[in-house]
Image (tube, grey):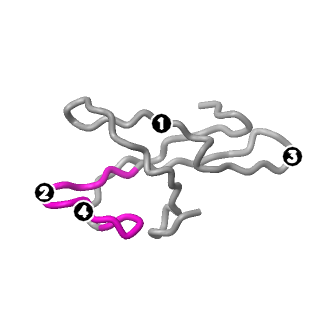
Amino acid sequence: VPLGYFDAHLDEVTYTDGPIIKREAGKENRFLTATFTLRNRTASPARYYWSDFLPELRDADGEKVAYTQAILKATRDEIT
């Protein structure tokens, strides 16, 4: 999918019971994680920021969920 200077590809969607950014999901809850690959479509260097992504997140009941405004590394619980 084109995304400004980047092409975005959804690689994986999974659930995790563990903490993310030192936040617990809560009793009987879990987090959904989505892993994307971004590829620069230009010949010039380009940067991305959490504010480049404006997702509309919804829970199983269809209610909107706040975006944490964080992009984490795919291999560890660390903000990029």
Q: Secondary structure at mark 1?
A: loop
Compare marks 4 and 2 and give the one earlier in the sequence: 4
Compare marks 4 and 3 and give the one earlier in the sequence: 4
- Marks 1 and 3 sit apart, C-alpha to C-alpha, by 26 Å
Q: Which amino acid type is shown beneath numbered disc 2?
A: Glu
Which residue has dot 2 on it? 28
Which residue has dot 3 on it? 44
- Marks 1 and 4 sit apart, C-alpha to C-alpha, by 22 Å
Q: Residue at x 38, y 37 (%)?
A: 57
Residue 4 position by quadrant:
top right
Q: Secondary structure at mark 2?
A: loop
Pair 1/3: label in front: 1
Residue 17: mark: 4
Report if the CB atoms under discs 4 and 3 are less than 8 Å apart: no
Image quarter where the C terminus lies is bottom right
Q: Secondary structure at mark 4?
A: loop
User: Residues in magenta?
Assistant: 19-33
Is disc 2 surrounded by few (<14), some (14 to 19) or many (20+) residues within 10 Å?
few
Which residue has dot 1 on it? 55
Vertical side of 14 occupied by 20: above or below: below
Vertical side of 32 occupied by 76: above or below: below
